[in-house]
Image: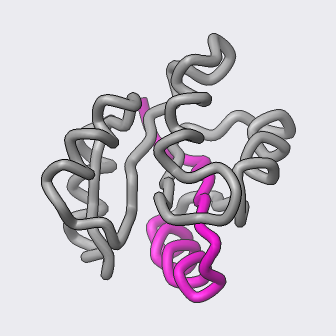
Amino acid sequence: MSIQKVLVVDDSKTELMFLTDLLQKKGMQVRTAENAEEAFRRLAEEKPDLILMDVVMPGQNGFQLTRAITRDPLYADVPIIMCTSKNQETDRVWGMRQGARGYITKPVDPAELQAKIDALS
C-alpha cells in the first residue's frame, strides 16, 4: 500500500507546518486537524492512508482519539503513528495498546518518520 494521503493531528501550528512541509516534499497530500473533533471531520471528508497523531491536545487526547479511530470499523484499517513529546516507555506501550502502529518522539527526526512510514507500506 502506497501512502499518499496523510492526516496530521496536532494542536501546535508549528508542528503542523513542520510535518506538512516534510510530507509534501515526499509527494504526499497532507490535511491537518488541531483537535479530535476536527480530526473526525477530516476523516469523514476523506479517508487518509495514514494518521500522524499528537498525544497532548486540549479535549480528547491522542491516546483516546487513537482508540476511538482504531475501534471504528470505517477507519480501523488506517495506520496511526503517534508523534509526541511523551518519551517514556510506558507512554509508547500505552500508545501501541490503543492501536497505534508506530511511535515517534518529538522533535521528529525526518529519517525516523520516513522509516516508520516505509515500514507500513
- Check residue 19 for magenta coloring: yes
Q: How is the image coloured?
A: one colour
Position of residue 61 relative to residue 56, above or below, is above
Q: Residue at x 39, y 29 (%)?
A: 99
Give the x, y percent position of residue 21: 54, 80
Tell whether 46 sits left or right of 70: right
Tell whether 28 sits left or right of 96: right
Give the x, y percent position of residue 104: 27, 61
**Looking at this rendering, what residue extends furthest in the left direction?**
89
**Looking at this rendering, what residue extends furthest in the top direction?**
73
Position of residue 22 relative to residue 116, above or below, is below
Q: Residue at x 22, y 70 (%)?
A: 111
The region drawn magenta spans 1-26
- Check residue 105 for magenta coloring: no
Question: In which quadrant of the rendered image does the C terminus lie?
Answer: top left
Give the x, y percent position of residue 43: 75, 38
Position of residue 28 relative to residue 26, above or below, is above
Query: For the image shown, how many numbered marks are present on the structure?
Result: 0
Q: Quadrant location of residue 9?
A: bottom right
Q: Residue at x 29, y 40 (%)?
A: 94
Question: In which quadrant of the rendered image does the N terminus lie?
Answer: top left
Position of residue 69 relative to residue 45, above or below, is above
Nearest the camera: 89 or 121? 89
Q: Residue at x 49, y 54 (%)?
A: 52
Q: Quadrant location of residue 2?
A: top left
Q: Quadrant location of residue 93?
A: top left
